[in-house]
Image (cartoon, rainbow, N blue to C red):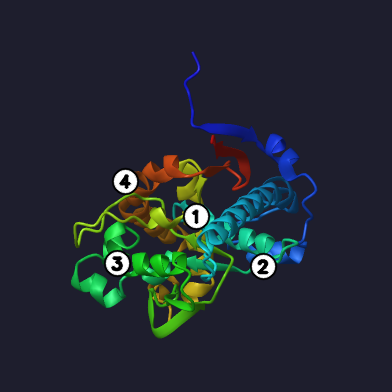
Amino acid sequence: MTSWSPYTRFTRAEWARLRADAALTLIPEDVLRLQGLNERVAMDEVVAVYLPLARLLSLYVEAEQVLYRARATFLGDATAKVPYVIGLAGSVGVGKSTTARILRELLARWPEHPRVDLVTTDGFLHPRRILEERGLLGRKGFPESYDLPRLIRFLADVKAGRSPVSCPVYSHPTYDIVPGASVVIDQPDIVILEGLNVLQAASDRSGDARVFVSDFFDFGIYVDAPETDIRRWYVERFLLLRATAFKEAESYFHQYAALSDEAAERTAGAIWDTINGPNLRENILPTRARAHLVLVKGQDHAIDEVWLRKL
């Protein structure tokens, strides 16, 4: 007997047929600019996977706007518009940042030309000094390493239609929050929030209120792949960074720039096995079932399947 699933599962070819008449608005140079360091997103993947997804999301956003206008008419209310919020989750190294960037570009170039902002939860990590004081630097990316109350306040303001709203800025080279820097969100139509644990249903431990980041989402996406593949991609990316960004003197990881290939592979593998792997298994992967849509990758980093939650 076939077990019941909350998702309708599409092969890449089946999903591609749902593109309908959605126009391709990206060129190869755009995709090259948007993809991650060790990812090679082909144009046919944009056409087969991302265009149908952008079409689906645009339909959802349009339906939500119709509902908003109906509610405003009923209440005689002319308050500021409320953005449609998309949460995008997945492991370190799985390519969720690339997915977020491509979706943002496609949605922003839709015929209605919505204003789309992309925010990452990296900006809501506690500063490195605080993580060090609390003994959490080795658990960076785990739920307790984030300033969850600040992230909740940010999303509450976004969903309340307040504008402008600002959020902190994170620097990957310095491995820290940039003091005094902020990104301003000003009346967007769509906000994409990308991060490791954004679909997690975990309470704020500082109080009794059980408010979750995902409570503010209209749509949730999870980028999935077998851990063995993600670990391999992570090690490959580490080796590429060792030869590029790690060479910069201001980089927190400058200490790894002179490692041999063998030593760099061991170091990256150890970081995965002690930090990223446990975080994936304990906190990230369990949230997959909460996503409205799952993008399933194969060994070559390409998306092979799409799972869409049944209504």
**Pointer 2: what residue?**
33
**Pointer 1: what residue?**
88
Q: At which x and y percent is residue 15?
A: 68, 39
Q: Amino acid at mark 2?
A: Arg
SS under mark 1: strand
The mark lying in front, picked from 1 and 3, is 3
Q: Considering depth in this image, is 33 or 307 the residue closer to the camera?
A: 307
Question: With respect to residue 220, does 251 lie above or below?
Answer: below
SS under mark 2: helix
**Pointer 3: what residue?**
149
- Marks 3 and 2 sit apart, C-alpha to C-alpha, by 34 Å
Crowd tier of the residue under label 1, counting other residues whose Cα lies within 10 Å: few below 14, some 14–19, many 20 or above: many
Question: With respect to residue 97, does 250 lie above or below?
Answer: below
Q: At which x and y percent is residue 11?
A: 65, 34
Asked where in the image residue 270 lies, by quadrant, the reply is bottom left
Mark before the other along the chain sequence, 3 or 4: 3
The residue most toward the bottom is 180
Q: Residue at x 36, y 67 (%)?
A: 151
104 lies left or right of 168:
right
Rendered image: mark on residue 209: none
125 lies left or right of 298:
left
The mark lying in front, picked from 1 and 2, is 1
